[in-house]
């Protein structure tokens, strides 16, 4: 291990902390905004900051997925749903105290749990010891793919990815059925055609 | 620098707490789904943090580098991001269906209509 050979990590941790502060700030803004349209757009910014953070944490594949799917597709879904459901959030009559108590209790337990975790970037951490070194050392020879994330996703754990595709397929059918059935019931009889996004768009 | 070793975990927990609050407190169903998504990203952050190795680089094999971050959390979270978008789409479709049936997406109003 010669960390110095691969660039200073001290600057990384300051960029990391700056991005984390931006993330928490964006999250607070999203929760407090009453205008849902604005909340959806700030959520897009949140996802984009998250994508930048993934790059700092060396997860470049996750970064472009987050930028495309998290900041892109999610924002489009949100905007379509908000167009269909109205952009103003009503002020809730319930007391916020149970919600604050629940999140503080969960947060406290989780922080207690982190105290035993290995430090940030520790090369001796258990997560770095078992199968990961095998993939890094033999992955290129065994699969011919230099990008180990791709090698694991498409080759070593191809069935996992098949399961993922099944989930997407099921979700797509669920969306189509939900919007299609609701439309048919409202209109009495009938034909529902077109994709889920298209239907939401017309609302 | 010692105090900074867990800052990623704590930021992730802060995001999880904000997300959990946004699931429980608001009456608006879309806002609850935003909170759910935020809670999920908090968990992603914990996983990716575990995979980071000090001085490492992205796990793309190149003769110029010999320390790489752990690729396994990246694979898991890639899958999880796509699944989270799928669940979000189903949730939003349910919300749109509720809007059609009740004329509102505010939980308080829906409860009131159900009681009648």
Image (cartoon, rainbow, N blue to C red):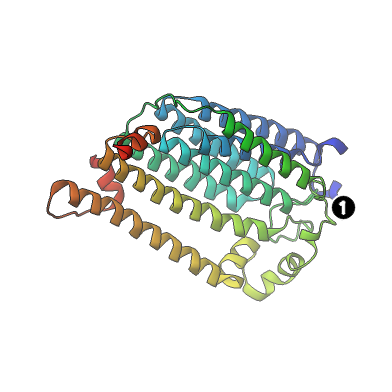
**Which one is in front, A118 or A187?**
A187
Give residue B41's quadrant in the image. top right
Going by the image, does A197 lie left or right of B86? left
Residue B70: percent from the left, percent from the top?
72, 58
**Residue A195, above or below A44:** below
Residue pictured at 69% horizontal, 57% vertical: B59
Residue A44: percent from the left, percent from the top?
49, 36
**Which one is in front, B57 or A45?**
A45
**Residue B98, above or below B56:** above
Identify the image quadrant of the C terminus of chain A. top left
Going by the image, does A54 lie left or right of B54? left
Which residue, as the protein is rendered here, is positioned at the far left? A189
Residue A9: percent from the left, percent from the top?
80, 41
Which residue, as the protein is rendered here, is positioned at the far front? B116
Helix, strand or loop at label 1? It is: loop
**Which one is in front, B60 or A189?**
A189
Going by the image, does A11 lie left or right of B60? right
**Which one is in front, A99 or A63?**
A99
Residue pictured at 63% horizontal, 56% vertical: B74
**What residue is pinned by disc 1?**
A2
């Amino acid at each position: 291990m010669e960390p110095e050979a691969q660039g200073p990590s001290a600057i990384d941790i300051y960029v990391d902390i700056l991005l984390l502060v931006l993330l928490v700030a964006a999250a607070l803004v999203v929760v407090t905004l009453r205008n849902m349209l604005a909340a959806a757009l700030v959520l897009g910014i949140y996802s984009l900051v998250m994508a930048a953070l993934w790059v700092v944490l060396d997860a470049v594949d996750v970064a472009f997925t987050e930028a495309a799917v998290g900041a892109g597709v999610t924002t489009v879904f949100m905007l379509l749903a908000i167009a269909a459901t109205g952009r103003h959030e009503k002020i809730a009559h319930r007391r916020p105290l149970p919600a604050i108590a629940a999140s503080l209790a969960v947060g406290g337990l989780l922080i207690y749990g982190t105290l035993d975790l290995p430090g940030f970037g520790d090369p001796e951490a258990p997560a770095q010891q078992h199968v990961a070194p095998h993939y890094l050392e033999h992955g290129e020879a065994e699969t011919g793919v230099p990008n180990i994330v791709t090698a694991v996703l498409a080759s070593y754990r191809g069935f996992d990815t098949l399961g993922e595709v099944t989930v997407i397929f099921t979700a797509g059918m669920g969306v189509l059925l939900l919007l299609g059935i609701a439309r048919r019931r409202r209109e009495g009889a009938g034909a529902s055609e077109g994709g889920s996004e298209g239907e939401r768009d017309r609302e | 620098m010692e105090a900074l070793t867990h800052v990623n975990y704590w930021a992730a927990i802060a995001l999880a707490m904000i997300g959990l609050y946004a699931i429980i407190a608001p009456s608006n169903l879309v806002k609850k789904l935003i909170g759910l998504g935020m809670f999920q990203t908090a968990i992603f952050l914990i996983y990716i943090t575990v995979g980071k190795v000090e001085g490492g680089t992205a796990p793309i094999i190149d003769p110029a580098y010999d320390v790489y971050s752990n690729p396994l959390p990246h694979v898991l979270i890639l899958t999880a991001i796509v699944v989270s978008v799928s669940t979000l789409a189903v949730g939003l479709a349910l919300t749109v269906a509720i809007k059609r049936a009740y004329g509102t997406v505010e939980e308080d109003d829906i409860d009131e209509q159900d009681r009648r």
